[in-house]
Amino acid sequence: MSSPFDGPLDRPIGESRPTVRLSPSWASPPTTPSPQLTIETSLRPEFGHVHPAASLSVCFMRTPRVPGQHRGWPMHGALGRLPFARVSELGRAVPYNWHEAGGVVVPMYRSEAAWLRFRSPTGYPFAVKVIAGATNAISGERWRAGLAMDPPNHLVVPAQGWLDGVRLGDRRVRQFAPDDAEARDGEPCGARLQLVVTPMKGDEWARRTARPTWPCAFVDDDLWGPDVWDESASQTCIVRMVPASCWSRISDQPVPHAPLGWHVFERSGLPWSDGFEEDGEVLHSGVELIP
C-alpha cells in the first residue's frame, strides 16, 4: 500500500491551494466506505528515490489529556500507538475537501491526547515541520514556507524523535487533541495537523557517511545548515484528529481501541475530568494498542 504522504504542500490548511500532485483515489472519493477499513498505526513516507537509506516512520502516541495548557505537568509516556485510517477509504461521510487533500483520520477520546514519535531506523536525517492550523507547532510562530534556520521552524530526526504539542511560549504547550465539539458547520471537526518531511540530499548523505560527522540537533537548533536538505523532495500528510464520538458516523465502524480509565490518571498523578466519563458511551472494538 502506498504512503498517504504526497506532494510538496507547505501552507496552512484552508488557504488558497497551489497545484499539488494528487493520486486519483484522493481526488475522487469513493461512493461508500471500504467494506473493511484498513487500520494503521504508523505513517511511512517514501523517499527511496532520494536514497535507499531514506526511511522514516511517524506514530501518534497515546497519552492522558491534561486540562488547559500543558504547563507544570511532565511529559507522560506512551500508552500505545493510536490507530488511524486513510481519508481515501472513508467515502462520502467526510467532506469532499478532505478527500481532495488526502491524508489520514485519527479517532481520539476526550481523555486522550497524542504526542508525535519519529523514527529513522537507518539514522538518515530528516527535517520535519508540523503545522497546526496556521501555527508552526515547533516555533510557535505563524506558518512560513520552507525551512528557516534562525530561529528554526523544524526539528531534525533522528536527533529529536518526538514532539509533544504546539508551542505557545512561556514554556506552555497545547497538546495534540481534537476539539470537544462533535461537528461544526455540518461537518466533522477536529485538530488538523500538516506534517512536512524533508530528507537530506542523497549525495550529501553519501558524502557524510563516507566521512562521518554527526552534529547533534535539537528543536532549537539545526547544526546541519540549510544547504543539506532536499526541499524539492519534501512530502506532506494532513492529519485530522477527530472525536471518537464522530468515528462511527464517518467510518461506519466502532472505534478500534477502548478509552482510558480514571485509574490511568490516578497512577499518573493527573486530574480526571467529569467530561471524560462520556468516553464510555462510545462503541469500540477494544483492540489492544501496539507499544
Image (cartoon, rainbow, N blue to C red):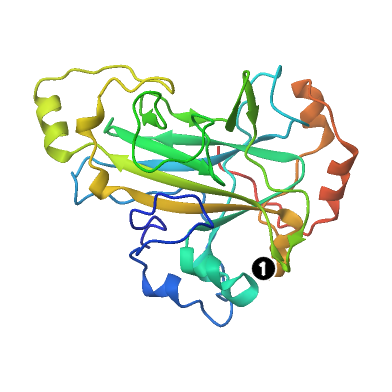
Counting from the top left corner in percent of width and height, residue 122 is at 27, 33
Residue denoted by label 1: 250
In the image, is 131 to the left or to the right of 50?
right
Counting from the top left corner in percent of width and height, residue 171 is at 62, 18
Q: Is 39 situated above or below 198?
A: below
In the foreground, 290 or 41: 41
Q: Residue furthest right?
A: 274
In the image, is 237 to the left or to the right of 90?
left
For numbered disc 1, what is the local secondary structure? helix
For image coordinates 81% across by 49% down, the residue present is 279
Quadrant where the C terminus sits is top right
In the foreground, 283 or 192: 192
Q: Quadrant of residue 81?
A: top right
Q: Amino acid at mark 1?
A: Ile
In the foreground, 188 or 61: 188
For image coordinates 51% across by 49% down, the residue present is 41
Count numbered badges in the picture.
1
Q: Is 276 situated above or below 64?
A: below
For image coordinates 39% across by 35% down, the residue present is 119
In the foreground, 122 or 193: 193
In the image, is 87 to the left or to the right of 145?
right
Quadrant where the N terminus sits is bottom left
Counting from the top left corner in percent of width and height, residue 121 is at 32, 34
